[in-house]
Amino acid sequence: MTTVALRSTPLGQILVDGSGRTLYLFEAGRSNMSSCYGDCASVWPPLIAGSTPTGAVGINQSLLTTTTRKDGSLEVVYNGHPLYYFISDKRAGDTTGQAISSFGAEWYVISATGSKVDNG
């Protein structure tokens, strides 16, 4: 089961997976559509779900959906933003991908409302 949760960080409450790993949105992405493949997905791996994802306390379940990637896998989406990890985040709670410009646009952590967090 794929779970999306909240974690307190210096950037505020942000979305993480069930293991506490930080999740990011890609500003170049289109609503509800994955736009990071190939080399991009090697650096920013998508959060893949085997079935409908579950939201932990504080997550708005109605904002939590999936989109089908080119390979047929289901990528988790929150408030229209496909969710990604950053390969350089090594531990739960790391946010080293915050506000990085990579693969044509910036990447941001996500608040409980589903908006990018651009402070910090």
Image (tube, grey):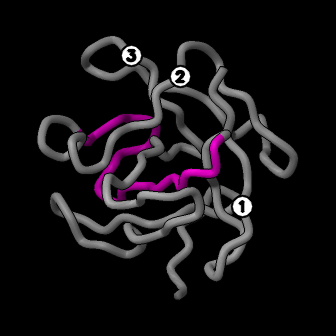
Magenta span covers which residues? 19-36
Residue 98: x and y in percent read 42, 72
* Residue position for label 3: 73
* Residue position for label 2: 49
Counting the numbered discs, the total is 3
Q: Residues within 10 Å of mark 3 (few under 14, many from 20)?
A: some
* Mark-to-mark CA distance, 3 and 1: 26 Å
Q: Secondary structure at mark 1?
A: strand
Residue depth check, mark 3 versus mark 1: number of the one nearer the observer: 1
User: In the visual, does 72 lie left or right of 92?
Assistant: left
Asked if disc 2 and disc 1 are in contact, CB closer than 8 Å, the reply is: no
Residue 26: x and y in percent read 36, 56
Q: Secondary structure at mark 3?
A: loop
Q: Amino acid at mark 1?
A: Arg
Lower sequence index among marks 2 and 1: 1
Lower sequence index among marks 3 and 1: 1
Q: Secondary structure at mark 2?
A: strand
Q: Examine the residues drawn in magenta and state their main secondary structure.
A: loop
Residue drawn where x is 46% and y is 35% of the image: 47
Question: Residue 93 colored magenta?
Answer: no
* Mark-to-mark CA distance, 2 and 1: 20 Å
* Residue position for label 1: 7
Q: Amino acid at mark 2?
A: Ala
Question: Residue 31 colored magenta?
Answer: yes
Quarter of the figure that contains the N terminus:
top right
User: In the visual, does 32 lie left or right of 58?
Assistant: left
Classify residue 96 by image quadrant. Answer: bottom left
Lower sequence index among marks 2 and 3: 2
User: In the visual, does 118 lie left or right of 102?
Assistant: right
Classify residue 18 by image quadrant. Answer: top right
